[in-house]
């Protein structure tokens, strides 16, 4: 295993980091299998585990803590809080303490301000009395050592955040699918001494599932496309750790092979240069060169075309428990948009003027106008716009309610509730959240009380809105029996929808 110093922290982190949100805990012996994978990763030199209270319904933290205990080795583990949910310093501090208790640890070396979507969101999170102050308190009490963030924000926003000097490290989405988009972030991070960790390093599974397409990244015949993609990321000297979520021992071993031998700086440069030269050989692939920028209609063409790349590849994406190639393509498109620029259109009306300026500039001679039109058609059919969210909520909340419940807690529900509160500012109904995660019961989630589902009939809300995309059908099948008790139960998503938040 190779190691690099993470920014100015002085901590030496392993090249490969263990992500914990893809373990298959729902399968027989799923928990033990996940712990076994994590323990083996630690034995092989992985010393950075990325986890959160929100992963796998709270099980991910328990897996991480148990793996650290069984391994008996010093391992860096994260704790996380989103400052728009844990809005106060006390709430963030409590979240840190609860996570440490869940993992059975006295401290976590890295606190992550989780899922920062924009510079404006970061400013809110770091305001006086907010989540950042809670993290500072935890740092003063030596519960955490370093304050970092994970970002799903546009590169320009990430750079602005780093320049505030308030974070010591950043986790960004970076892979062969976005070769040039985040290079400015890497350059500024190096300039400022901010550590960089990459997530979604295998393009959400697209790269290993399309090995022939990405074979150009391989430096020798024995190297798999997945290992080559991880090695390519690590070839950038600004990147300390490359995260990967591994569900089997075989996947762990394959990922480890990407880092089993050190490359000198010349080898790394050759790897990057070879990959950069090969992108143009993929027919119809947008390289992200950004020559098409400056659209008179204000369209972020680069982000859209990077997302369109996802259509070109097959993928067995299963994270969202959906089927149908068209729907899976739409999920991949919107997922890429979320990772690259956190973009969601205000509506699905194509704003393109068809002036052709972008196509004149495109070095790949791509049919940009046609692709933009195709993307907006897909946004419409998959309900991916702010207008679709608003219309869906207006259609759901048609009555006078005294008691409204959402199921389940999380950033997704927060997004839905924020739209609900804007649409119905004068509603007087009591709002609550149900969630099966017992760690959340009787706590406030963005100021809203989270209840034990066992109290459902006791509380008896007028309506339950299932504001969960992945497990929507399972939740409905579990609680539909309560409809006979006069409780209206509504799934917020239609079968053809993509998620509104990734």
Image (cartoon, rainbow, N blue to C red):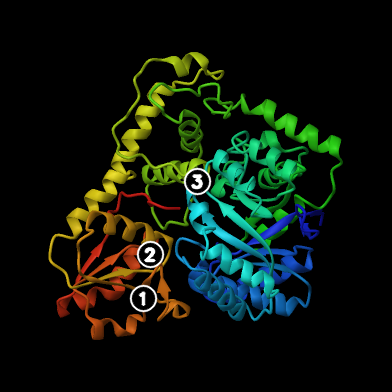
Q: Secondary structure at mark 2?
A: loop
Given residues 31 and 343, the one toward you in this image is 343
**Residue 304 x, y percent position in the rendering:** 45, 33
Check residue 315 in the rendering and tell me which mark sits there, or answer none.
3
Using the image, determine if residue 122 lies above or below residue 444. Answer: above
Using the image, determine if residue 145 lies above or below residue 389. Answer: below
**Residue 463 x, y percent position in the rendering:** 21, 70
Q: Disc 3 vs disc 2: which is toward the camera?
A: 2
Disc with the residue nearer the chain's start (3 vs 2): 3
Check residue 449 in the rendering and tell me which mark sits there, or answer none.
1
Pointer 1: residues within 10 angstroms few (<14), some, or many (20+)?
A: some
Residue 249, visible in the rendered structure: yes
Q: CA distance from mark 1 to mark 2?
A: 21 Å
Residue 26, visible in the rendered structure: no
Disc with the residue nearer the chain's start (1 vs 3): 3
In the image: residue 457, left or right of residue 197 = left
């Amino acid at each position: 295993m190779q190691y690099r110093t993470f920014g100015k922290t002085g901590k030496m982190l392993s090249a490969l980091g263990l992500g914990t949100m893809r373990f298959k805990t729902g399968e027989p012996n799923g928990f033990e299998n996940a712990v076994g994978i994590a323990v083996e990763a630690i034995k092989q030199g992985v010393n950075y585990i990325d986890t959160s209270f929100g992963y796998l319904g709270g099980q991910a933290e328990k897996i991480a803590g148990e793996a650290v205990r069984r391994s008996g080795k010093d391992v860096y583990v994260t704790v996380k809080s989103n400052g728009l949910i844990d809005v106060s310093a006390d709430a963030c501090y409590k979240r840190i303490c609860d996570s440490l208790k869940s993992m059975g640890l006295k401290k976590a070396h890295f606190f992550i301000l989780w899922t920062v979507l924009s510079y404006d969101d970061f400013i809110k999170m770091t305001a006086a009395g907010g989540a950042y102050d809670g993290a500072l308190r935890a740092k003063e009490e030596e519960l955490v050592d370093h304050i970092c963030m994970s970002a799903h924000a546009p590169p320009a926003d990430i750079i602005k955040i780093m320049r505030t000097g308030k974070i010591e490290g950043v986790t960004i989405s970076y892979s062969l699918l976005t070769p040039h988009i985040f290079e400015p972030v890497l350059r500024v991070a190096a300039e400022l001494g901010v550590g960089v960790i990459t997530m979604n390093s295998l393009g959400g599974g697209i790269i290993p599932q399309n090995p022939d397409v990405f074979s150009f990244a391989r430096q020798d015949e024995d190297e798999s496309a997945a290992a080559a993609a991880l090695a390519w990321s690590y070839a950038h000297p600004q990147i300390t750790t490359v995260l990967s979520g591994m569900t089997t021992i075989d996947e762990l071993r394959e990922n480890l092979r990407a880092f089993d031998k050190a490359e000198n700086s010349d080898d790394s440069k050759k790897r990057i240069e070879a990959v950069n030269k090969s992108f143009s050989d993929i027919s119809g692939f947008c390289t992200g060169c950004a020559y098409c920028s400056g659209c008179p209609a204000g369209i972020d063409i680069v982000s859209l075309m990077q997302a369109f790349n996802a259509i070109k590849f097959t993928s067995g994406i299963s994270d969202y428990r959906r089927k149908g190639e068209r729907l899976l393509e739409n999920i991949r498109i919107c997922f890429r948009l979320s990772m690259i620029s956190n973009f969601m259109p205000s509506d699905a009306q194509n704003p393109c003027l068809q002036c052709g300026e972008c196509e004149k500039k495109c070095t790949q001679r791509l049919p940009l106008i046609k692709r933009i039109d195709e993307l907006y058609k897909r946004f419409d059919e998959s309900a991916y716009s702010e207008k679709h969210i608003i219309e869906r909520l207006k259609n759901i909340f048609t009555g006078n309610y005294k008691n409204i419940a959402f199921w389940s807690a999380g950033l997704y529900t927060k997004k839905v509730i924020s739209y609900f509160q804007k649409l119905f500012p004068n509603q007087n109904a009591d709002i609550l959240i149900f969630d099966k995660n017992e760690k959340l019961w009787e706590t406030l989630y963005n100021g809203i009380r989270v209840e034990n589902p066992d109290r459902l009939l006791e509380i008896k809300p007028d309506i339950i809105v299932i504001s969960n995309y992945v497990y929507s059908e399972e939740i409905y099948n579990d609680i539909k029996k309560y409809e006979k008790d006069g409780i209206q139960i509504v799934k917020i998503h239609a079968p053809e929808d993509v998620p509104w938040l990734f």
